[in-house]
Image (tube, grey):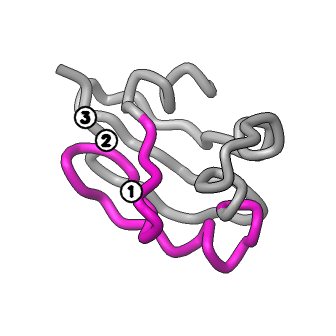
């Protein structure tokens, strides 16, 4: 099972992500946030909100409840 084991904010909508399979890259969430019209995801358009994430249940989670499956995050590579 794929897990996010480390995540660091880089700038803009970019997060450096490391997975338990050894893969590490910078995931750019800008197009995801701009193309998803659900209000809960649109809240992440505010950079202050976007930057405020944690690692929970093996993925990146924001305070408003948004999270993305590790497999989806890896597809942003």
- Residue 10 relative to residue 37: left or right: left
Residue 62's image quarter? bottom left
Instruction: Say what secondary structure mark 1 lies in.
Output: strand
Instruction: Say what secondary structure mark 2 lies in.
Output: strand
Which residue is at a point 37% across and 31% down the rendered structure image? 70
Q: Position of residue 72 (x, y in %)?
A: 49, 25
Q: What is the C-alpha distance between the residues marked 1 and 3?
A: 13 Å
Q: What is the C-alpha distance between the residues marked 1 and 2?
A: 11 Å
Q: Mark 1 and 3 residues: CB-CB less than 8 Å, in contact? A: no
Q: Residues within 10 Å of mark 1 (few under 14, many from 20)?
A: some
Instruction: Say what secondary structure mark 3 lies in.
Output: loop
- Nearer to me, 55 or 23: 55
The segment highlighted magenta reads 44-68
Q: Earlier in the sequence, mark 1 or mark 3?
A: 3
Q: Residues within 10 Å of mark 2 (few under 14, many from 20)?
A: many
47 above or below 15?
Answer: below
Q: Position of residue 13 (x, y in %)?
A: 72, 56
Quadrant where the C terminus lies? top right
Q: Select label 1 or label 2 by which is in front.
A: 1
Query: Which residue has dot 3 on it?
Result: 3
Query: Which residue has dot 1 on it?
Result: 61
Query: Which residue has dot 2 on it?
Result: 4
Which residue is at a point 51% across and 74% down the rendered structure image? 52
Q: Residues within 10 Å of mark 3 (few under 14, many from 20)?
A: some
Q: What is the C-alpha distance between the residues marked 2 and 3?
A: 4 Å
């Amino acid at each position: 099972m794929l897990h996010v084991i480390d995540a660091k904010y880089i700038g803009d909508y970019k997060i450096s992500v490391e997975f338990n399979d050894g893969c590490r890259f910078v995931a750019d969430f800008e197009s995801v946030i701009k193309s998803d019209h659900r209000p809960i995801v649109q809240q992440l358009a505010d950079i202050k909100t976007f930057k405020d994430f944690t690692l929970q249940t093996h993925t990146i989670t924001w305070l408003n409840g948004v999270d993305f499956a590790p497999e989806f995050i890896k597809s942003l590579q």
